[in-house]
């Protein structure tokens, strides 16, 4: 089971704080010099990536053997053939259409990024970028729809059960923007200089972003992700 990213971040944050040890009742906990706060980031720090690259390059175990497992995994191939973008993705236990393909592409993006960090091969970097740029198209489409743009591409659609037939763009739930667009827009537009006009409009409409919807994303993106 994979925990949501924000749960992992919270765990890393708590683990990184130098909390005092708890002794017996009435016992004074030993004091220690406070350590400088180091942001936990996501799964890997720069030091983690440097360690992987250096140890593998030196042929040291167990890093060499661990890298061989990564290198020979099918998701680590720089010639990975994308399954997406997908028209439909559902997590329904009865018919998880597109879910496995989406997960496979996500694994390929992550593992190719690791391969690039360890080997320096630009082919792996380009493959990760190719996959992650569905991600942007998916956000642009969703933002464009929820902003009320009726020129958004649409074709008649029948759902996986065959019961519901959609002949026009539905107004149900439209304009219900979730606080996730600051993170996306700041990364693609400001950090990577990739145009994301509809994502920007959604971010503008929500700013400042508040709490997240359940645990699907962090929320509070205006504070967390805004870049100068």
Image: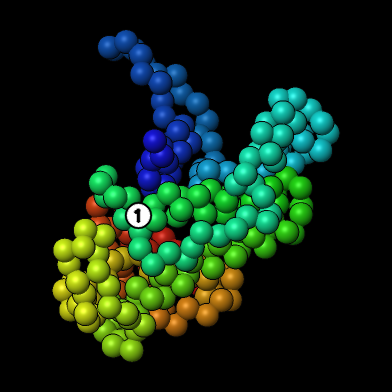
Identify the residue at horizontal 81%, vertical 38% (top origin). Answer: 57
Comparing 88 with 10, the one in front is 88
- For mark 1, give the secondary structure: loop
Residue 13, compared with residue 212, is above or below; it is: above
Comparing 113 with 103, the one in front is 103
Residue 145, compared with residue 63, is above or below; it is: below
- Tell me how the rendering is colored: rainbow
Q: Is residue 7 visible?
A: yes
Which quadrant would the N terminus be assigned to in this image?
top left
How many numbered marks are there? 1
Q: Position of residue 187 (x, y in %)?
A: 51, 67
Label 1 crowd bin: few (<14), some (14–19), many (20+), radius 10 Å: some
Specify the quadrant of the image occupied by residue 155.
bottom left
Residue lying furthest bottom: 151
Q: Is residue 218 visible?
A: no
Q: Position of residue 63 (x, y in %)?
A: 71, 30
Identify the residue at horizontal 57%, vertical 51% (top origin). Answer: 108
Specify the quadrant of the image occupied by residue 50.
top right
Q: Is residue 201 left or right of 124 when viewed as pictured? A: left
Comparing 123 with 212, the one in front is 123
Identify the residue at horizontal 70%, vertical 40% (top origin). Answer: 71
Q: Position of residue 41 (x, y in %)?
A: 51, 48
Would you name the residue on which mark 1 appears?
A: 97
Residue lying furthest front: 162
Identify the residue at horizontal 76%, vertical 52% (top origin). Answer: 120
Q: Position of residue 202 (x, y in %)?
A: 34, 77
Residue 30, compared with residue 161, is above or below; it is: above
């Amino acid at each position: 089971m994979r925990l949501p990213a924000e749960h992992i971040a919270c765990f890393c944050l708590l683990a990184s704080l130098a909390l005092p040890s708890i002794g017996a009742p009435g016992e004074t906990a030993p004091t220690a010099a406070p350590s400088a706060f180091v942001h936990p980031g996501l799964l890997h720090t720069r030091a983690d990536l440097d360690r992987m690259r250096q140890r593998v390059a030196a042929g040291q175990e167990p890093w060499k053997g661990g890298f061989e497992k990564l290198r020979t995994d099918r998701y680590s191939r720089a010639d990975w053939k994308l399954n997406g973008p997908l028209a439909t993705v559902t997590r329904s236990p009865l018919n998880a259409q597109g879910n496995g393909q989406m997960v496979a592409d996500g694994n390929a993006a992550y593992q190719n990024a690791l391969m690039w960090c360890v080997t320096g091969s630009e082919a792996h970097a380009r493959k990760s970028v190719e996959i992650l740029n569905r991600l942007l198209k998916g956000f642009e489409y969703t933002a464009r729809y929820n902003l009320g743009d009726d020129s958004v591409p649409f074709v008649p659609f029948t759902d996986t059960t065959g019961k519901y037939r959609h002949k026009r763009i539905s107004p149900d739930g439209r304009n219900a923007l979730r606080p996730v667009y600051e993170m996306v827009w700041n990364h693609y537009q400001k950090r990577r200089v990739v145009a994301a006009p509809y994502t920007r409009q959604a971010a503008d409409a929500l700013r400042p972003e508040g709490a997240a919807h359940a645990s699907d994303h962090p929320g509070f993106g205006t504070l967390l992700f805004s870049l100068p």
